[in-house]
Amino acid sequence: MNEDLQSLMAKAQESLAAARLLLDRGYHGFAAARAYYAMFYVAEALLASLGKSYSSHAGVLGGFGQEFAKTGKLDVKFHRWLIDGQDIRNVGDYGVGTEVSSDQAVEVISQAEEFIRAGQACLRDEG
């Protein structure tokens, strides 16, 4: 795995660790947002392993769906989690009058943990 991919995977791990800390402190929205970013960095790393780079979240989500979900390289659920994670991140970061519950944050963190494991396995298989 090259240095750029390692850096993105490290950022994913750091984001997951931050999500856990934020959850423990009761910052559910911010915890969910960090968990989304953990998945986002893994998606970026996976796309970069194919020589692909995108300049927007929408580009990364679309590219991930095209290259990994539609091809069957990874289960479609990971693409769904990435999309749902972005939605919950938007609520956590920008939502006014809406909140992310503790249960929602716990679920996104759990998804991010599995997303990271799947990404690591995929990168090992490819590289």
Image (cartoon, grey):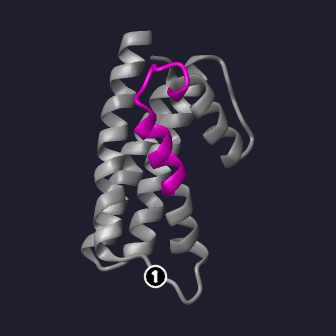
| Secondary structure at numbered mark 1 | loop
The answer to whether one can see residue 22 in this image is yes
Query: In the image shown, does 115 or 76 lie closer to the viewer?
Result: 76
Query: In the image shown, does 9 or 101 lie closer to the viewer?
Result: 101
The answer to whether one can see residue 127 in this image is no
Left or right for 88, reference 102: right
Query: In the image shown, does 116 or 80 lie closer to the viewer?
Result: 80
Horizontal and vertical percent for residue 14?
Answer: 38, 49
Left or right for 54, reference 73: right
Instruction: Say which amino acid is labelled 1.
Output: Glu
> What residue is at 30 percent from the left and 75 percent from the top?
102
Q: Is residue 118 above or below residue 60?
A: above
Magenta: main secondary structure:
helix
Stretch of the chain drawn in magenta: 69-85
Q: Which residue is mark 1?
A: 99
| Residue 61 figure quarter | top right
Horizontal and vertical percent for residue 93?
Answer: 56, 72
Q: Is residue 18 above or below residue 112?
A: below
Left or right for 39, reference 26: right
Q: Residues within 10 Å of mark 1 (few under 14, many from 20)?
A: some
Horizontal and vertical percent for residue 50?
Answer: 60, 17
Left or right for 55, reference 39: right
> What residue is at 59 percent from the left and 86 percent from the top?
96
Q: Is residue 3 above or below residue 126?
A: below
Query: In the image shown, does 77 or 119 lie closer to the viewer?
Result: 77
> What residue is at 36 percent from the left and 15 percent from the top?
124
Horizontal and vertical percent for residue 107?
Answer: 31, 59
Q: Indicate whether residue 72 is drawn in magenta.
A: yes
Q: Indicate whether residue 47 is drawn in magenta.
A: no
